[in-house]
Amino acid sequence: MDLFAAETIANLLPYGGEVNYYGKMVDKLHADYYLKKLLTDIAWKNDEAIIFGKHIITKRKVAWYGNANYSYAYSGTTRHALPWTKELLELKAIVEQHTTTIYNSCLLNLYHNGDEGMAWHSDDEKSLGKDSTIASLSFGAERKFALKHRETKEGVSLMLEHGSLLVMKGTTQTHWLHSLPKTKKVTTPRVNLTFRTMV
């Protein structure tokens, strides 16, 4: 069954990259199902990072799945990919169909509530290759997603809905930073799946 709408959405960025927001691409019944499975079946671990020489363990949890035992290094730590689950393969196939891109890995983030977020960054690790496409599926609490141009500081933001798809491609990671701001208004969890292509 095709859970996704076929229409494509205009570029949200004024220049220097391409970000398309498809809105709710998975209906609520299936989105609720996937959220429950992701919360219970994924091998979640607290994220770790080396920031200014200090070892930080975050409240936010992460998991890394892929085609092979890829290693993925960021913020001073290295992760190794776990084999795909049935649900992740289902979601990967649907995302690939609508983005016409093949992905070989997925980094998942679990934000328990609005106290957990992500600071300004870009997904420009060498292991991803230059100008690679990243497809982001969101399940659970609606959260604000913000983008900021590295040089002009011009900003764009939107709310990522339960069951929605956002795609970043082209030179987006070169010229733009993105973040998930913290908020006291959100008290329920959000799971974010970022499908990637490792080189």
Image: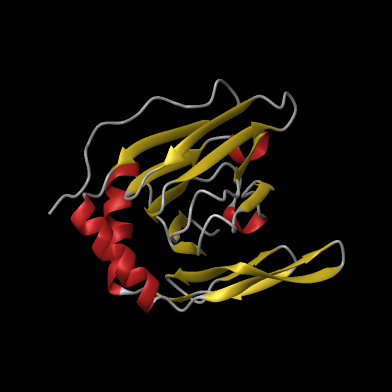
Q: Position of residue 30 (x, y in %)?
A: 21, 58
Name the foreground residue: 66 vs 199: 66
User: In the shown orientation, is residue 35 left or right of residue 114?
Assistant: left
Q: Nearer the viewer, residue 136 or 171?
A: 136
Q: Is residue 17 visible?
A: no
Residue name at image x 36 percent, y 69 percent: 38
Tally the numbered discs.
0
Which quadrant, please, contains the C terminus? bottom right
Q: Residue furthest top?
A: 14
Q: Where residue 82 appears, x then y in whole percent?
A: 46, 77
- What residue is shown at x 33% (from left), y 64% (from top)? 35
Which residue occupies the foreground of this view, 141 or 102? 141
**Going 34% across and 37% down the picture, which residue do you hit?**
22
Residue 140 visible in the picture:
yes
From this view, report whether residue 147 is shown above or below residue 112.
above
In the rendered image, residue 187, in percent from the top left (x then y), is placed at 47, 58
In percent of the image, x 40 and y 35: which residue is there? Answer: 21
User: Residue 183: horizontal and vertical position, in percent?
Assistant: 57, 48
> The N terminus appears in which quarter of the rendering?
bottom left
Q: How is the image coloured?
A: secondary structure
Quadrant in which residue 83 is drawn: bottom left
The front one of 93 and 116 is 116
Q: Is residue 135 left or right of residue 28?
A: right
Relative to 126, is 159 above or below?
above
Q: Residue furthest right?
A: 53
